[in-house]
Image (cartoon, rainbow, N blue to C red):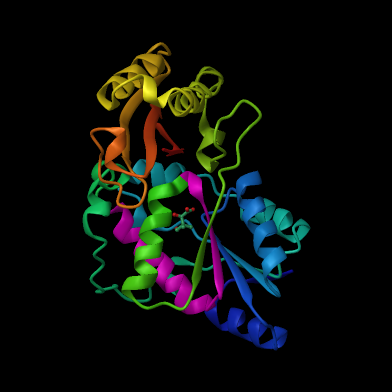
Amino acid sequence: MHICKSINSLNKVLDSLRPYKNAGFVPTMGALHEGHLKLVEHARKENDIVICSIFVNPTQFNNPKDLEKYPRMPEKDALLLEKENCDIAFIPSSKEIYPEKDRTNYDFGEIENVMEGKFRPGHFKGVGMVVKRLFEIVKPDNAYFGLKDYQQYLVIKKLVNQFNLNVNVIGCPTVREKDGLAMSSRNLRLSEEQRKAAPIIFESLKYIKNHFSSKSIPGWKEWFKSQINRFPALDVEYIEIADAETLMPVKNSNESKNIVVCTAVFAGEIRLIDNILLKC
Ligand code: PAF
């Protein structure tokens, strides 16, 4: 596997691998877990070459403490990528990604003002900025994103449309621990008590999916909070039940064909997000 730390070296390696039919790309912020490796596996199956980037993107963090504490382990990550037969690990510096201020106007409409966008102002502009830049550098045919970050997946699809980027955006199912907790690099920071409590998030989402018609939407939101509040280690930031395409909240289940339930729950200062799709 090639490790490229600059755009120059990435371009040289890409040239040396030509001709290739298609290139698959997995953008990450490192601290790789099974969820990321599944994205690489997926990319491996569908592309001649696979590139994975590791870049902790400062512009998408609205909380400086979260940025500072974000786990960083590039050497271990590179070994994991090599095992997955990734062709290139692209590990650029901030200077490579942001040589100058990006003055592009990113506008994703209402979707960036709800849920993650509401509680992490500016977050999706930062995601849009880095993903557009990475797409322009790597020039992939296909790019793979985990559906744990469901809102991010929708925003990236909008980004690709808005800027006419020639990339297929592919959403891959959330990978979970045995007890249901969605895999996330932030899980590494959970205390024993927080880790023990965290599976209630997905358990409760699953319960809503399986019993959806038995309660009103406000009733389910209250029920979810009461389930999570049983655990002193956890605190609900939001629970939203929304149209799965627009992410606009729905008041009852007939309002939309596809509905998604999305939540963010704090475990101390660590934010855990998860979601489940309901087919009506
Ligand atoms: O999902 C992530 O890890 C990040 O938001 C991404 C897409 C790599 C952009 O920094």
Residue drawn 56% across and 83% down?
8
- Residue, x 51% and y 54% (percent of image)? 29
Please state which of residues 148 and 68 is positioned toward the viewer in this rendering.
Answer: 148
Q: Which corner quadrant of the image does residue 159 belong to?
A: bottom left
Task: Please provide percent x and percent y for residue 75.
Answer: 67, 55
| Residue 263 in view of the camera | yes
Residue 36 sits above or below residue 1 on the image: above
In this rendering, the count of numbered labels is: 0
Residue 224 or residue 251, whichever sits in front: 251
| Residue 269 in view, yes or no | no
| Quadrant in which the C terminus appears | top left
Residue occupying the point 71% across, 75% down: 48
When the figure is inspected, residue 154 is found, relative to residue 225, above or below; the finding is below
- 65 and 218: which one is in front? 218
The magenta region covers 122-148
- In the image, 81: left or right of 136? right
Pick the quarter of the image with the N terminus: bottom right
Q: Name above or below for residue 49 compared with residue 15.
A: above
